[in-house]
Each structure stands twice: as structure tokens, then as C-alpha cells.
Amino acid sequence: MITTLTERLHGLASLFWREVAKFGAVGGVAFVIDNGLTYYLMHGPMTDSEAKARFVGASIATVFSWIANRFWTFRHRRQDNVVREFLMFILINGIGIGISTGFTALAKYTFGVTDKNMLFAAGVVGILVATVVRFFAYRFLVFNKELDEEPEFSHDHEIIERHPHTKPEVRVEGAAVKDPELPDPHI
């Protein structure tokens, strides 16, 4: 049983590694766009509107992120309905932007932080929290088309389903009968 659990955990980790690596690369570029623009706006045109500066930076980064994730990270999972996919993406990112902007606003208005660098850092912490939420939301809600059409991904679903080497019990007139092809666990 421990071996089976270990195999499943290993398989689940390998299932996500390709997407996590690409998601991380896209996220890294979006992080630079978001924070670079936010920093510029906080220290320039939006000097007294730190939360709004964070919102603008995050919004621009979101547009980049959707394009990059759609055409690279999750290209095998794109939905046929592009409008639905985009609206789900915007909704998920709205939640993410709310988290990062909320951290900045919380620091400024609740805790009375006035130092721009500390407010900037609060937004960065919010981005890190939002990133975890975004990955799983993108993976399971936005870019969720099955990969069975692609040969390299065709068996991924077996990793998270029942172990491929076991067969279910056969039911005969309401009674459970052991599958004769499986070894007897009591021997």
C-alpha cells in the first residue's frame, strides 16, 4: 500500500512539473511587468495612490499572462470556447489582483504603513499568495480541457485515478467476488 501511495504521489508530481515550470516562467515575466510598472507608478504618476498603482500593474501583467498561458503553458488544455476561457481567466485574476491589492491596502489603511517600499513589499507578498491560488484555478477551472488527444499526455489521468495495476471486484448477484487475476492478499 505504501508503494502504491508513493507511486501515485510521484506520478502526480510528474504530472504537474511541465505545467509548473512553464507557469513559473510566465509568472516570472508577469511578476517583473507587474512590479516594474507598479514601482514606477508608485514613485511617479500615482505617488499618493499605491493600491491603484498595484491594480494597474497587475492588470497589465494579467493580459500578458493570459496570452502566454493560453499559447504556451496550457496550450494543450485550451478550451474551445475562447470567450468563456478568457472570462474565467479574468475572474481568477480579479481574485488574484484583489489579493495583491488587498495586501497593499491592508498595510496602508489598517496598519498605517506609509513607507512606499513597505507598501510595495506588502503587494509582493500578496502576489505570492495569489500565485498559488492562480495556478490551481488555471489548471482546474480555466485551462481544463482533457489531454487524452495528445499522445504524450494520454495516460496522465491514470496517475490520479485508481492504480492501473489493480482491478475492481466483480459483483455477482449482489455478492463481491475476488478477481481471479489478482493475487490473494491473505496468502
Image (cartoon, rainbow, N blue to C red):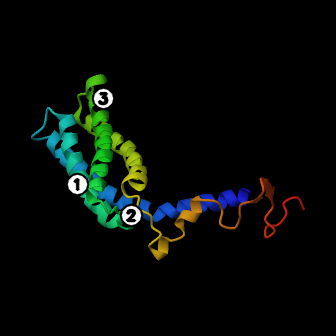
Residue at the disc numbered 3: 106
Pick whichever, 6 or 117, lies toward us: 6
Quick one: SS at disc 3?
A: helix
Q: CA distance from mark 1 to mark 3?
A: 25 Å
Report which residue position mark 1 lands on. Answer: 63
Helix, strand or loop status at disc 1: helix
Q: Quadrant of residue 2?
A: bottom right
- Residue lying furthest front: 173
The disc labelled 1 sits on which kind of residue? Answer: Val
Q: Which mark is residue 77?
A: 2
| 155 shown above or below 24 | below
Task: State the residue in front, 119 or 29.
Answer: 29
First-in-chain label (2 vs 3): 2
Rendered residue at 77%/53% (across/down): 174
User: Going 64% across and 60% down the picture, which residue do you hit?
Assistant: 162
* Residue 26 rendering spot, x and y as whole percentages: 32, 59
Q: Amino acid at mark 2?
A: Arg
- The answer to whether residue 112 shows anywhere in this view is no
Residue farthest toward the bottom in the current orientation of the protein: 151
